[in-house]
Image (cartoon, rainbow, N blue to C red):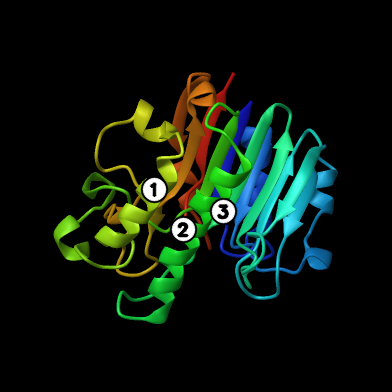
């Protein structure tokens, strides 16, 4: 199975690029984030005509996640559960073939001294609790998406500039590590320990061409799935060209 995760920064604005990418890469599962469209307006036809089904959890203008899959998606869960439901469309879970796919768009946090940062930390803690309550480390699980956290300094082009800032702050790295402690493995890092590997680049100041980026998009898996992962990569080429998303797809090959 080829599984990919991509923050497309508006599926309608980036539809042609996403469809072209699918035609070239033929993923079995494509998890999308920041789709920015209500479910009834999601552009399904280009995917369905290619043999995919779309499972969406969106909202107008902001957020939004979707799972595009060749095989049917079962046992779908939309959003973190009660008693404190997330007002944003940020989590979508489904079973595809033998994998439980958890697709997330973690809050950005904006600024460390803002209430949005506290909400980000709380969301990550709730995600950790959700995994603990609904799954086991022995299950075949993939957690993927835009985590909005660079886990280590090697995931940042300039660690000194980002120190104690959003995406790299010790508190959010700790909160993300608690999610990983469920029993999840970063499959890109398992195959690529080197620095200089990023999934997001600012649109401004030629950041992409200068490779001034962050690795904040991830595919994590439980050990049973990670052991089946023969390769993982970030498709940097998908960030090139006219009107790209500011993120690149992350791809995992799972036997």
Label 1's element?
A: helix
Is 4 displayed left or right of 115 in the figure?
A: right
Give the mark nearest the N terminus, 1 or 3.
3
Residue 226 visible here: yes
**Residue ranking furthest to the bottom:** 114
User: Which residue bears the numbered disc 2?
Assistant: 124
Residue 202, horizontal then vertical, whole percent: 37, 64
Instruction: Identify which residue, 47 or 230, lies in the foreground.
Output: 230
Please rate how many residues cluster around mark 2, counting C-alpha atoms within 10 Å: few if below 14, some from 14 to 19, many from 20: many
Can residue 209 be seen in this snapshot?
no
Q: CA distance from mark 1 to mark 3?
A: 16 Å
> Of the numbered discs in the image, which one, if any, rests on residue 178?
1
Q: Quadrant of the N terminus?
A: top right
Q: Nearer the viewer, residue 179 or 90?
A: 179
Classify 32 as above or below 120: above
Determine the CA span between mark 1 and mark 2: 8 Å
Mark 2–mark 3 CB contact (< 8 Å): no
* Number of numbered discs: 3
Task: Provide residue 220's location: percent of width, then percent of height.
Answer: 48, 38
| Contact, mark 1 vs mark 2 (Cβ under 8 Å) | yes
In the image, taking residue 15 as reference, residue 185 lies left or right, namely: left
* Nearest the eye: 152 or 46: 152
């Amino acid at each position: 199975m080829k599984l990919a995760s991509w923050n497309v920064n508006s599926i309608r604005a980036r539809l042609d690029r996403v469809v072209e990418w699918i035609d070239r890469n033929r993923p079995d599962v494509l998890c999308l984030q920041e789709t920015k469209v209500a479910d009834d307006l999601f552009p399904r036809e280009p995917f369905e005509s290619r043999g995919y089904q779309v499972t969406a959890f969106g909202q107008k203008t902001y957020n939004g996640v979707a799972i595009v899959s060749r095989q049917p998606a079962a046992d779908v869960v939309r959003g973190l559960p009660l008693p404190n439901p997330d007002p944003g469309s940020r989590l979508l879970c489904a079973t595809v073939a033998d994998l439980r796919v958890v697709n997330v768009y973690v809050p950005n946090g904006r600024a460390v001294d803002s209430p949005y940062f506290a909400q980000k930390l709380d969301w990550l803690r709730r995600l950790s609790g959700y995994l603990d309550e609904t799954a086991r480390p022995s299950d075949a699980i993939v957690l993927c998406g835009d985590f909005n956290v660079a886990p280590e300094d090697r995931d940042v082009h300039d660690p000194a500039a980002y120190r104690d800032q959003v995406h790299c702050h010790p508190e959010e790295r700790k909160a993300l590590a608690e999610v990983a402690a469920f029993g999840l493995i970063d499959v890109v890092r398992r195959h690529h320990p080197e620095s200089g590997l990023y999934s997001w680049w600012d649109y401004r100041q030629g950041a992409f061409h200068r490779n001034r980026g962050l690795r904040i998009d991830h595919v994590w898996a439980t050990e049973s799935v990670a052991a089946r992962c023969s390769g993982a990569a970030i498709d940097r080429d998908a960030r090139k060209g006219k009107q790209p998303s500011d993120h690149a797809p992350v791809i995992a090959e799972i036997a």
